């Protein structure tokens, strides 16, 4: 975050630079919505300053089992969580995403907008899933993996791996050739 943003507001909430907030810890709660790779460090830094965190579940989201949502989770609008979904602490789920039954999301993971997880998917800790990605039923994405935008995951992903969407390939219409 840019220290020049201090003093501004986002939707009526004040923005503070991390170096200026130590004196506010007793009276304020923190929401941390940054990429998974930086979130754990930010959370620990804020905890060391005495801040507590809050969860936010948007009222336009559908959550079947709220008792399976961890602490300090942010769920944006139009998210749909089916039955038996489990969300660990400090997870950020962006808008218009859907999770099938019995899916589990590990701590400090980030789920981008328009992500669709099939049933019984297991997402590790610190995983980042990019905009529009889809994970087919019954697959596991291990700790620290990154799934890029638009990827279709139909395999188990190793810890720390990056999975890229392959570019589309144009196909010729019958009787025509492809030019470059």
Image (cartoon, helix red, strand yellow):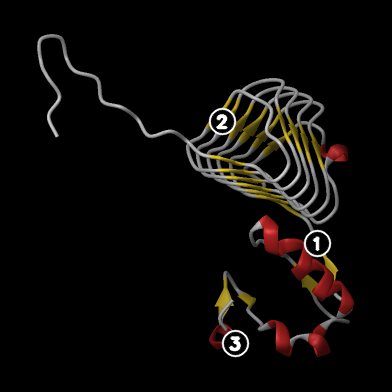
Sequence order check, earlier mark of 2 and 1: 1
Which residue is identified by label 1?
54
Gap between marks 3 and 2, in whole Å?
Answer: 39 Å
Q: Is residue 104 left or right of residue 161?
A: right
Task: Tell whether label 1 touches label 2 (CB within 8 Å).
Answer: no
Which residue is identified by label 2?
134
- Residue 174 position by quadrant: top left
Q: Residue 146: x, y in percent?
A: 62, 45
Relative vertical location of residue 94 with respect to residue 34 in this rendering, above or below: above
Using the image, tell me which numbered label, if any, was put on residue 32.
none
Q: SS class of the residue under badge 1?
A: loop
Relative vertical location of residue 119 with respect to residue 87 in this rendering, above or below: above
Q: Residues within 10 Å of mark 1 (few under 14, many from 20)?
A: some
Question: In this view of the protein, which residue sits in the foreground, 28 or 151?
Answer: 151
Sequence order check, earlier mark of 3 and 1: 3
- Residue 142 position by quadrant: top right
Gap between marks 2 and 1, in whole Å?
Answer: 28 Å
Which residue is identified by label 3?
7
Q: Residues within 10 Å of mark 3 (few under 14, many from 20)?
A: few
Viewport quadrant of the C terminus: top left
Gap between marks 3 and 1, in whole Å?
Answer: 21 Å
Q: Is residue 150 left or right of residue 125?
A: left
Query: Looking at the image, is mark 2 or mark 1 nearer the viewer?
Result: 2
Q: Residues within 10 Å of mark 2 (few under 14, many from 20)?
A: many
Q: Residue 137: x, y in percent?
A: 67, 20
Question: In this view of the protein, which residue sits in the foreground, 81 or 2?
Answer: 2
Task: Tell whether label 2 touches label 3 (CB within 8 Å).
Answer: no
Q: Residue at x 12, y 29 (%)?
A: 179
Q: Is residue 175 left or right of residue 43?
A: left
């Amino acid at each position: 975050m840019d220290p020049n943003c201090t003093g501004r507001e986002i939707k009526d909430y004040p923005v503070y630079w991390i170096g200026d907030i130590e004196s506010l810890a007793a009276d304020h709660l923190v929401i941390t919505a940054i990429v998974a790779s930086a979130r754990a460090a930010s959370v620990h830094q804020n905890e060391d300053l005495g801040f507590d965190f809050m969860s936010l579940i948007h009222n336009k989201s559908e959550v079947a089992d709220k008792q399976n949502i961890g602490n300090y989770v942010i769920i944006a609008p139009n998210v749909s969580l089916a039955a038996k979904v489990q969300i660990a602490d400090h997870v950020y789920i962006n808008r218009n995403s859907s999770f099938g039954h019995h899916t589990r999301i590990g701590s400090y993971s980030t789920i981008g907008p328009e992500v669709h997880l099939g049933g019984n998917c297991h997402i590790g800790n610190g995983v980042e899933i990019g905009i529009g990605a889809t994970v087919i039923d019954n697959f596991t994405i291990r700790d620290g993996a990154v799934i890029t935008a638009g990827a279709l995951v139909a395999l188990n992903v190793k810890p720390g791996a990056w999975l890229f969407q392959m570019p589309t390939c144009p196909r010729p219409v019958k009787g025509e050739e492809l030019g470059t």
